[in-house]
Image (cartoon, rainbow, N blue to C red):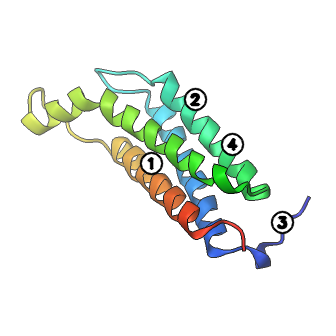
């Protein structure tokens, strides 16, 4: 099955970027394995996987009302991530135990945030012509 990329809208490419960013964020999140206060939260992983799979399916066969679902799943997963890291963020902010924000934490947050924004923008723009 081939995909004709010439006839895809800008929204389609942005929607694809949201899946790629969510996948990158998920891989880093799992590889990081949490910090001294938390571990990987299975619900966040499952929501991200469902979002990515649905995103890919919708890239292949757009279904109008479902285009917003991956964005929502990415957002919930990102909120779970930040919620689970609140003690870590607090310790860094107050300098309690000498911890600092790490590159993997920043990458998870940045790619997660980009996946949310791209998913929302693509849903607004329409992913099909």
Q: 61 and 30: which one is in front?
A: 61
Does label 4 or label 2 sit earlier along the sequence? 2
Whether residue 88 is situated above or below residue 18 in the rendered picture: above
Residue denoted by label 1: 112
Q: Residue at x 40, y 21 (%)?
A: 39
> Which one is nearer the viewer's eye here, 28 or 109?
109
Q: Nearer the viewer, residue 10 or 106?
A: 10
Q: Which residue is mark 2?
A: 46
Q: Quadrant of the C terminus?
A: bottom right
Percent coordinates x, y for residue 14 in the rendering? 58, 66
> On the picture, is 79 further left or further right than 96?
right
Horizontal side, residue 28 vs residue 63: left or right: left
In percent of width and height, residue 6 lies at 78, 79
16 left or right of 86 in image? right
Residue at the (84%, 65%) spot, across then down:
3
Tell me the quadrant of the picture where the N terminus can be found: bottom right
Q: Are marks 3 and 2 in contact (CB under 8 Å)?
A: no
Q: Could you give the CA–CA distance between mark 4 and mark 1, rounded to whole angstroms?
A: 16 Å
Q: Earlier in the sequence, mark 1 or mark 3?
A: 3
Is label 3 in contact with label 4 (beta carbons under 8 Å)? Answer: no
What residue is disc 4 on?
A: 53
Dot 2 falls on a residue whose secondary structure is helix
Q: Marks 3 and 2, Cα distance to the nearest angstrom?
A: 27 Å
Return the x and y of residue 64 as percentages of the image width and height: 69, 57
Check disc 1 and report its element: helix, strand or loop.
helix
Q: Residues within 10 Å of mark 2 (few under 14, many from 20)?
A: some
Distance in Å between CA atoms under marks 3 and 4: 17 Å
Q: Position of residue 11 (x, y in %)?
A: 61, 69
Q: Please report whichever mark, 3 or 2, sits nearer to the chain's N-terminal start.
A: 3
Distance between the Cα atoms at labels 2 and 1?
Answer: 14 Å
Q: Residue beneath label 3, please?
A: 3
- The residue carrying pointer 3 sits among few (fewer than 14), some (14 to 19) or many (20 or more) residues within 10 Å by Cα, namely few
């Amino acid at each position: 099955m081939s995909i004709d990329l010439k006839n895809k809208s800008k929204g389609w490419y942005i929607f694809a970027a949201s899946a790629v960013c969510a996948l990158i964020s998920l891989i880093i999140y799992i590889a990081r394995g949490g910090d001294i206060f938390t571990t990987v939260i299975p619900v966040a992983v499952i929501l991200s996987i469902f979002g990515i799979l649905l995103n890919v399916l919708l890239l292949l066969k757009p279904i109008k009302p479902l285009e917003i679902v991956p964005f929502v799943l990415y957002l919930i997963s990102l909120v779970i991530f930040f919620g689970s890291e609140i003690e870590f963020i607090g310790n860094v902010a107050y300098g309690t135990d000498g911890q600092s924000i790490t590159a993997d934490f920043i990458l998870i947050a940045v790619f997660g945030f980009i996946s949310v924004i791209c998913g929302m923008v693509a849903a607004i723009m329409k992913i099909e012509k």
